Amino acid sequence: MSAVDKPTGPAAMRALTVGLQGEVFALPAETVSEILDMVPVTEVPNARAFVNGVINVRGKVVPLADLRVMFGMERTPPDADTRIVVTEIDLDGEPALVGIIADKVHDVTEISDASVEEAPKVGMRWPAEFVRGIGKHGDDFIIIPDMGRIFGSKGDRDPSFTTDERKAK
């Protein structure tokens, strides 16, 4: 290993931190393509409950997801701080763009791999199967969602989160 290849310290994840109802979540910074103000949303009939609809991002149709629904939080109307984080995820082995609603975008930070722990199976407010880990940054906890499981189509989501309006009637 040359001096150029040698790591300079513990491994870390560069993450964009976003707020969802007062909680801080981290998205891998290298997957974020842009951050947008709220734009018009076209609703999609019979979409999963956490998918608000689709948006136009530079001529591409991009699904818009509200992770608050997946994490059992209240869906609130957008305000002056609300942003859409456009990110690329691996969806069943293929890259896909998705928009994620954030109550607030904080900053890009580094989360040391050593500070990331597995989500506890009990006592959590969020479904543990959708959490890749919980990192510590200073005195704060940062939730690292498992985007592949949240958006995946292989039946690994809790069906109670995928209900549509027809089932609510």
Image (cartoon, rainbow, N blue to C red):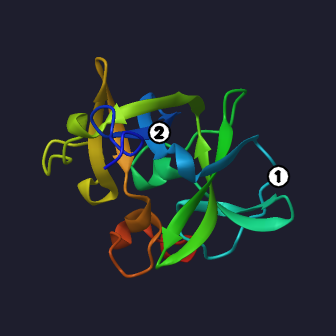
Q: Is residue 115 above or below residue 167?
A: above
- Who's the residue at 46% across and 79% down the image? 92
Q: Is residue 85 above or below residue 82?
A: below
The answer to which quarter of the image holds residue 153 is bottom left
Q: Nearer the viewer, residue 32 or 63?
A: 32
Dot 1 alpha-carbon crowd within 10 angstroms: few under 14, some 14 to 19, many 20 or more = few
- Who's the residue at 36% across and 68% down the image? 160
Q: Nearer the viewer, residue 144 or 19?
A: 144
- Who's the residue at 35% across and 46% down the image? 2
Q: Are marks 2 and 1 in contact (CB under 8 Å)?
A: no
Q: Which label is found at residue 40?
A: 1
Left or right of residue 106: residue 44: right
Q: Is residue 138 above or below residue 34?
A: above
- Counting residues from the start of the chain, the first of labels 2 and 1 encountered is 2
Q: Which label is found at residue 85?
A: none
Q: Is residue 135 above or below residue 47?
A: above
Q: Nearer the viewer, residue 48 or 7?
A: 7
Q: Residue furthest bottom?
A: 154
As helix, strand or loop, the secondary structure at mark 2 comes to strand
- Who's the residue at 70% across and 71% down the image? 44
Q: Which dot, 2 or 1, sits closer to the camera?
A: 2
**Mark 1: which amino acid?**
Pro
- Dot 2 corresponds to which residue? 15
Q: Position of residue 29 (x, y in %)?
A: 53, 43
**Mark 2: which amino acid?**
Ala
Q: Position of residue 26 (x, y in %)?
A: 44, 40
As helix, strand or loop, the secondary structure at mark 1 comes to loop
